[in-house]
Amino acid sequence: MNNTLEKWRAEIDSIDDELLTLLNRRARLVAEIGQMKKREHAPLLDPDREREILARVCESSDGSLNETGIKKIFQTIIDESRRIQSVEGVSKTASQVAKPQWNQVTIIGCGLIGASFALALRKTGTCRRIAGWDIDEAVLREALRRSIIDEVDSSFADSSTSRSDLIYLAMPIGSIIDFFREHGQQIKAGTVVTDAGSTKVEICRAAREHLREGVIFVGGHPIAGSDQSGLAYSDADLFTGIPYVLVNDVDQTDQRRAFDETLKAIGACVRLMTSDAHDRALTFISHLPQLLSSSLAVTVVDQTDADELLDLSGSGFRDMTRLAGSSWSMWRGILETNRAQITTALDAFAQRLEMVRQRLRAFSEGGCDQITEIERIFTEANYLARMANRGAMHME
């Protein structure tokens, strides 16, 4: 036995040496690619390529490693590749920015998204000064203390005109619409105004109605977030590699192009959509999941033995109800401004759920063929889950 064990261990050592040689060779290629990206001013991150790598290695594996193990190994390799290219000075941050594109940017709403955007601007050097405004004075003081902002933009409180040439609205949807109504005339012509709201049709309509002529509004939505909220969890890399939707109903101007370049500089992947297309897409991938998660949580809590049920709950239930912790202050505006699309999606889901209920009832009554339709749902859902996991990282 000892001889066999030593032989196997020696073979493992040899394989490890070969792996290390191959990984170092891969690292050299990654560094060369990084230098090429730097010369061509291309983005450092390529999420589509990373997803392709994970999908390919999972599909080509025919050994003992399961898909989860393969993903962990290759995700570590991908993370190390990112580090190598970052060390090589590739355009992750300010290396692509020749000079600041904005004299002053005002962040209105210094929570997770607003503060993270400010930190990303500071990290990339895309503006000279960052001002902030928030209805909570304690939040403003903390943003100043942490050097997230350089100063308070008090123009919207004292009815003067803001000096900023980019204004970033990171508030709940209702607050964004109210801001346009109350302060739309306090923004100088030529300023770019953008938002981070989760619906776009009503926000874009309010901007058209209330902003001063000459102000350039760009509807936006970073598909980013965190389980945590608030300034304390802000992150300069929050937008790195994530889809960032811009509404493509504005003519290209120098200011609009400057904003596009700013998003690319902070690592975001810009996606152009109409406001209607955005709201429909987010209905299915964000708004409907939120309502399902919250409804499931309440359904369980309403049971007379809820405590016993929760004591037995595992990771599956936690995954399904994670979204149930989302803030109503944010979701109220989403539901109010996208209610028609959400209602249509709920109808489609309710029909599918009713079909499952009917098939289960028929199956329990002896209709053995009825289970086949439910099996088909599982098969299709398994495929979608694999695809979604390969693209993983998104935030509601």
Image: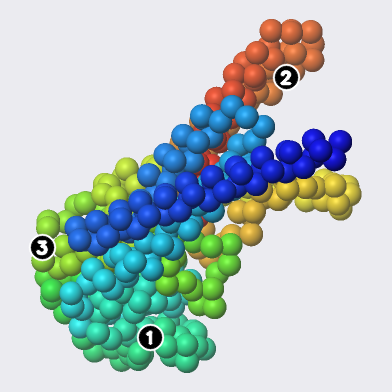
Percent of width and height locating residue 264: 27, 61
Quadrant containing the N terminus in the rendered view: top right
Q: Circle 1 sits on which residue?
A: 149
Q: Which residue is nearer to you in this view: 298 or 61?
A: 61
Q: Which residue is nearer to you in this view: 241 or 132?
A: 241
Residues at circles 3 and 1 in contact by the CB criterion of under 8 Å? no
**Which mark sits nearer the N-terminus, 2 or 1?**
1
Residue 2 - label? none
Distance from Cα at disc 3 to Cα at disc 1: 27 Å
**Marks 3 and 2: which is nearer the front?**
3
Distance from Cα at disc 3 to Cα at disc 2: 58 Å
**What residue is rendered at 68% in x and 11% in y?**
370
Distance from Cα at disc 2 to Cα at disc 1: 57 Å
Residue 360 - label? 2
Is residue 206 in view?
no
Q: Circle 3 sits on which residue?
A: 253
Q: What element does badge 3 sit on?
A: loop
**What residue is rendered at 30% in x and 53% in y?**
33
Residues at circles 3 and 2 in contact by the CB criterion of under 8 Å? no
Percent of width and height locating residue 10: 69, 43
Would you call the spot at circle 1 few (<14 residues within 10 Å), some (14-19), or many (20 or more)? many
**Which mark sits nearer the N-terminus, 3 or 2?**
3
**Marks 2 and 1: which is nearer the front?**
1
**What residue is rendered at 29% in x and 50% in y?**
271
Percent of width and height locating residue 198: 41, 56
